[in-house]
Image (tube, rainbow, N blue to C red):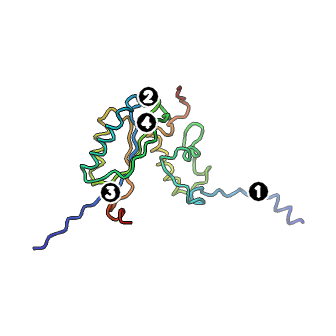
Amino acid sequence: MENNLTVKKRFFPRKKVCRFCADPSLVIDYKNPELLKQFLNEKGMIIHRRQTGNCAYHQRRLTTAIKRARIMALLPFVADIEIEE
Amino acid sequence: MFEIPKVERFRKWETLFIIHPERVDEKEAVLEKFRQIVKDKKGDVLKIDEWGMRKLAYPIEKKKRGYYVYAEFYGRADLPQELENFFRIDERVIRYIIVKLEDRYQPEKESTN
Protein backbone atom coordinates (compact mmCIF):
# COMPACT_ATOMS: atom_id res chain seq x y z
CA MET A 1 0.00 0.00 0.00
CA GLU A 2 2.71 2.47 0.93
CA ASN A 3 4.62 1.55 -2.14
CA ASN A 4 1.60 2.36 -4.31
CA LEU A 5 1.26 5.85 -2.84
CA THR A 6 4.84 6.78 -3.51
CA VAL A 7 4.47 5.66 -7.08
CA LYS A 8 1.36 7.84 -7.53
CA LYS A 9 3.13 10.94 -6.22
CA ARG A 10 5.92 10.71 -8.74
CA PHE A 11 5.35 12.61 -12.00
CA PHE A 12 6.02 10.71 -15.19
CA PRO A 13 6.23 12.85 -18.29
CA ARG A 14 4.51 10.91 -21.05
CA LYS A 15 7.00 9.98 -23.74
CA LYS A 16 5.87 11.41 -27.08
CA VAL A 17 6.28 9.12 -30.07
CA CYS A 18 6.95 10.24 -33.60
CA ARG A 19 3.65 9.85 -35.46
CA PHE A 20 5.32 8.91 -38.71
CA CYS A 21 7.47 6.20 -37.10
CA ALA A 22 4.47 4.77 -35.25
CA ASP A 23 2.30 4.64 -38.37
CA PRO A 24 4.25 3.82 -41.56
CA SER A 25 1.14 4.33 -43.70
CA LEU A 26 1.38 8.08 -43.04
CA VAL A 27 3.42 9.49 -45.90
CA ILE A 28 4.87 13.00 -45.73
CA ASP A 29 3.90 14.68 -48.96
CA TYR A 30 3.67 18.33 -49.90
CA LYS A 31 0.46 17.53 -51.82
CA ASN A 32 -1.39 16.64 -48.62
CA PRO A 33 -1.88 19.98 -46.83
CA GLU A 34 -4.46 18.54 -44.40
CA LEU A 35 -1.78 16.39 -42.75
CA LEU A 36 0.85 19.14 -42.78
CA LYS A 37 -1.57 21.61 -41.20
CA GLN A 38 -1.44 19.62 -37.96
CA PHE A 39 2.20 20.62 -37.58
CA LEU A 40 1.59 24.35 -37.94
CA ASN A 41 0.48 26.69 -35.18
CA GLU A 42 -2.32 29.20 -35.62
CA LYS A 43 0.08 31.74 -37.14
CA GLY A 44 1.20 29.24 -39.75
CA MET A 45 4.64 28.65 -38.22
CA ILE A 46 6.18 25.18 -38.09
CA ILE A 47 5.87 23.69 -34.59
CA HIS A 48 9.12 22.66 -32.91
CA ARG A 49 9.70 18.95 -32.74
CA ARG A 50 10.14 19.25 -28.99
CA GLN A 51 6.39 19.89 -28.86
CA THR A 52 5.20 17.45 -31.49
CA GLY A 53 7.57 14.63 -30.59
CA ASN A 54 8.68 13.93 -34.13
CA CYS A 55 12.02 12.25 -34.72
CA ALA A 56 14.76 14.23 -36.43
CA TYR A 57 14.46 12.28 -39.70
CA HIS A 58 10.75 12.91 -40.12
CA GLN A 59 10.93 16.51 -38.91
CA ARG A 60 13.45 17.22 -41.68
CA ARG A 61 11.15 15.73 -44.30
CA LEU A 62 8.19 17.55 -42.81
CA THR A 63 9.82 20.98 -43.03
CA THR A 64 10.75 20.54 -46.70
CA ALA A 65 7.22 19.31 -47.46
CA ILE A 66 5.67 22.31 -45.66
CA LYS A 67 7.94 24.71 -47.53
CA ARG A 68 7.02 23.14 -50.87
CA ALA A 69 3.33 23.33 -50.01
CA ARG A 70 3.75 27.02 -49.14
CA ILE A 71 5.27 27.71 -52.56
CA MET A 72 2.26 26.11 -54.23
CA ALA A 73 -0.19 28.13 -52.07
CA LEU A 74 -1.54 24.98 -50.40
CA LEU A 75 -0.41 26.33 -47.02
CA PRO A 76 -0.04 29.96 -45.97
CA PHE A 77 3.27 31.69 -45.24
CA VAL A 78 1.42 33.89 -42.75
CA ALA A 79 -1.94 32.63 -41.55
CA ASP A 80 -3.40 35.98 -40.43
CA ILE A 81 -4.33 37.03 -43.96
CA GLU A 82 -7.81 35.91 -44.92
CA ILE A 83 -8.89 35.79 -48.52
CA GLU A 84 -12.38 37.14 -49.14
CA GLU A 85 -14.41 35.24 -51.65
CA MET B 1 36.10 -2.68 -83.94
CA PHE B 2 33.41 -3.27 -81.43
CA GLU B 3 30.57 -0.92 -80.87
CA ILE B 4 29.71 0.61 -77.57
CA PRO B 5 26.01 0.04 -76.94
CA LYS B 6 24.13 3.26 -76.49
CA VAL B 7 22.29 3.32 -73.22
CA GLU B 8 19.51 5.83 -72.69
CA ARG B 9 18.96 6.82 -69.13
CA PHE B 10 15.78 8.37 -67.87
CA ARG B 11 14.66 10.10 -64.76
CA LYS B 12 11.20 10.41 -63.33
CA TRP B 13 9.64 13.60 -62.00
CA GLU B 14 6.35 14.94 -60.83
CA THR B 15 5.04 18.43 -61.33
CA LEU B 16 2.25 20.53 -59.92
CA PHE B 17 1.27 23.78 -61.56
CA ILE B 18 -1.47 26.36 -61.21
CA ILE B 19 -3.29 27.66 -64.26
CA HIS B 20 -4.66 31.20 -64.39
CA PRO B 21 -8.27 31.07 -63.08
CA GLU B 22 -9.65 33.27 -65.84
CA ARG B 23 -7.93 31.33 -68.61
CA VAL B 24 -8.94 27.78 -67.66
CA ASP B 25 -10.55 27.33 -71.09
CA GLU B 26 -7.01 27.40 -72.51
CA LYS B 27 -5.83 24.61 -70.23
CA GLU B 28 -5.89 22.03 -73.06
CA ALA B 29 -3.39 24.15 -74.98
CA VAL B 30 -1.10 24.27 -71.92
CA LEU B 31 -1.36 20.52 -71.42
CA GLU B 32 -0.68 19.87 -75.12
CA LYS B 33 2.45 22.06 -74.97
CA PHE B 34 3.54 20.25 -71.81
CA ARG B 35 3.13 16.83 -73.48
CA GLN B 36 5.01 18.02 -76.53
CA ILE B 37 8.00 19.26 -74.48
CA VAL B 38 8.15 15.95 -72.62
CA LYS B 39 8.01 13.98 -75.88
CA ASP B 40 10.77 16.10 -77.41
CA LYS B 41 13.12 14.79 -74.73
CA LYS B 42 12.17 11.18 -75.52
CA GLY B 43 10.03 10.97 -72.43
CA ASP B 44 6.40 10.32 -71.81
CA VAL B 45 3.64 11.57 -69.55
CA LEU B 46 2.62 8.78 -67.18
CA LYS B 47 -0.26 10.41 -65.35
CA ILE B 48 -2.22 13.64 -65.40
CA ASP B 49 -4.46 14.45 -62.48
CA GLU B 50 -6.53 17.61 -62.56
CA TRP B 51 -7.37 18.77 -59.06
CA GLY B 52 -9.63 21.48 -60.41
CA MET B 53 -10.36 24.93 -59.05
CA ARG B 54 -9.03 25.45 -55.53
CA LYS B 55 -8.81 28.37 -53.18
CA LEU B 56 -5.24 29.63 -52.76
CA ALA B 57 -3.80 29.98 -49.26
CA TYR B 58 -2.62 33.47 -50.14
CA PRO B 59 -3.20 35.66 -53.21
CA ILE B 60 -0.82 35.17 -56.13
CA GLU B 61 -0.76 38.07 -58.60
CA LYS B 62 -4.00 39.29 -56.98
CA LYS B 63 -5.77 36.03 -57.79
CA LYS B 64 -7.57 34.17 -55.05
CA ARG B 65 -8.24 30.91 -56.87
CA GLY B 66 -6.34 28.67 -59.21
CA TYR B 67 -6.74 25.57 -61.35
CA TYR B 68 -4.33 22.88 -60.11
CA VAL B 69 -2.89 20.23 -62.43
CA TYR B 70 -0.64 17.40 -61.25
CA ALA B 71 1.41 15.22 -63.61
CA GLU B 72 4.00 12.46 -63.48
CA PHE B 73 6.45 12.03 -66.34
CA TYR B 74 9.87 10.72 -67.28
CA GLY B 75 12.52 11.77 -69.74
CA ARG B 76 16.13 12.77 -70.23
CA ALA B 77 18.00 14.69 -67.56
CA ASP B 78 17.70 18.10 -69.24
CA LEU B 79 13.92 17.95 -69.45
CA PRO B 80 13.08 19.98 -66.29
CA GLN B 81 15.12 22.90 -67.55
CA GLU B 82 13.06 23.06 -70.74
CA LEU B 83 9.86 22.72 -68.78
CA GLU B 84 10.86 25.45 -66.36
CA ASN B 85 11.56 27.78 -69.29
CA PHE B 86 8.07 27.12 -70.60
CA PHE B 87 6.34 27.50 -67.23
CA ARG B 88 8.21 30.70 -66.40
CA ILE B 89 7.48 32.42 -69.69
CA ASP B 90 3.89 31.23 -70.17
CA GLU B 91 1.45 33.70 -68.62
CA ARG B 92 -1.26 31.08 -68.23
CA VAL B 93 0.79 29.26 -65.57
CA ILE B 94 1.05 31.29 -62.37
CA ARG B 95 3.00 28.84 -60.17
CA TYR B 96 4.81 25.55 -60.74
CA ILE B 97 7.00 23.04 -58.92
CA ILE B 98 9.00 20.11 -60.31
CA VAL B 99 10.15 17.37 -57.92
CA LYS B 100 12.40 14.42 -58.81
CA LEU B 101 10.96 11.03 -57.91
CA GLU B 102 13.52 8.57 -59.30
CA ASP B 103 17.09 8.98 -60.48
CA ARG B 104 17.09 5.89 -62.72
CA TYR B 105 13.82 5.09 -64.36
CA GLN B 106 13.44 2.23 -66.82
CA PRO B 107 10.17 2.51 -68.75
CA GLU B 108 10.58 -0.96 -70.38
CA LYS B 109 10.87 -2.66 -67.02
CA GLU B 110 7.79 -0.91 -65.70
CA SER B 111 5.64 -1.97 -68.63
CA THR B 112 6.58 -5.67 -68.43
CA ASN B 113 5.91 -5.92 -64.72
Q: Nearer the viewer, residue A2 or A23?
A: A23
Q: Marks 4 and 3, how far apart in space?
A: 27 Å
Q: Marks 3 and 2, how far apart in space?
A: 34 Å
Q: In which quarter of the image is the N terminus of chain A?
A: bottom right
| Residue at mark 4 shares a chain with residue at mark 1 | no
Q: Marks 4 and 2, how far apart in space?
A: 11 Å
Residue A56: % across, % down = 53, 56
Q: Nearer the viewer, residue A28 or A67?
A: A28
Q: Name the residue under label 1.
A: A11
B101 lies above or below A37: below
Q: Residue type at mark 4: give it.
A: Tyr
Q: Mark 2 points at which residue?
A: B63
Q: Residue type at mark 3: give it.
A: Arg
Q: Residue type at mark 1: give it.
A: Phe
Q: Name the residue under label 3.
A: B11
Residue B67: which numbered mark, if any? 4
Instruction: Chain letter for mark 2, please.
Output: B
Q: What element carries label 4?
A: strand
Q: In which quarter of the image is residue B101?
A: bottom left
- Nearer the observer: mark 4 or 2; the answer is 4
| Residue at mark 4 shares a chain with residue at mark 3 | yes
Q: Nearer the viewer, residue A62 or B5?
A: B5
> Reading the chain from its start, which is encountered first: label 3 or label 2?
3
A78 lies above or below A15: above
Residue at image coords 51%, 57%: A57
Q: Residue type at mark 2: give it.
A: Lys
Horizontally, is B47 left or right of B55 in the view? left
Q: Is mark 2 on a helix, strand or loop?
A: strand
